Image (cartoon, rainbow, N blue to C red):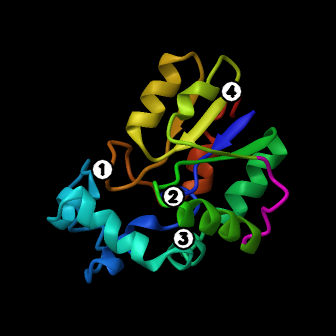
Amino acid sequence: MIFLDMDGVLCDFVSAAFSAHGSTFDPQDYPRGGFALDEVLGCTTAEFWRRIDFAGEYFWENLEPYPWADVLFRELQQVDEVIIATSPSRSPASYSGKKRWLRYMGMHGVQSMFGSRKYLMSKPGRILVDDGEHNTTQWEREGGQAILVPQPWNRAKPTEDMVSNILGQLPDAG
């Protein structure tokens, strides 16, 4: 069973968040390992979410899919059952907007788990594919295997081929 994160893995939350704050995301200028976007953008946590929540469902359902999103999803489905594991914000619009995004991407029939405590689903034999080190660390602590998706906000080494990078880290990958 593979648990696949959305934001930062399948879709570009960071660029959309920067845009909501009148800024442009540049991976080259991003402070390596800076997961707290409010700090990177120089605002409070409340202000960070206020601007995103103001956009409502529109913000979430219109996140740009990464170029590898569809291929990664389909390839992982060939390996095992895939469950979308995503952390919505506190706004109800986040949940409904993410559901709409999944439908738009043709993933409406796929099982999904919405919640910030992903580690509760971890156990041996289960894999988490996520860009958040806090999620991958907790997942592994609970006995599962985690694959950290390379992004500027984590320690994973950047890659040119995201799909091959992730598939190559699966158990029994050649």
Residue 8 location (% of width, % of height): 48, 57
Q: CA distance from mark 3 to mark 4?
A: 27 Å
Whichever of labels 1 and 3 marks the residue nearer the N terminus, that label is 1
Query: Label 3, on which residue?
Result: 60
Query: Label 4, on which residue?
Result: 126
* Bounds of the magenta segment: 105-111
For the residue pair 131 and 114, the one nearer the viewer reads as 114
- Return the mark for residue 35: 1
Tell me the amino acid under the disc marked 1: Phe
Whichever of labels 3 and 4 marks the residue nearer the N terminus, that label is 3
Tell me the amino acid under the disc marked 2: Asp
Tell me the amino acid under the disc marked 3: Trp
Local packing at callout 4 (Cα closer than 10 Å; few below 14, some 14-19, many 20+) is some
Residue at 57%, 78% (x, y): give it: 62
Using the image, determine if residue 125 lies above or below residue 93: above
Residue at 57%, 16% (x, y): give it: 143
Q: Viewed as shown, does residue 8 lie left or right of 101?
A: left
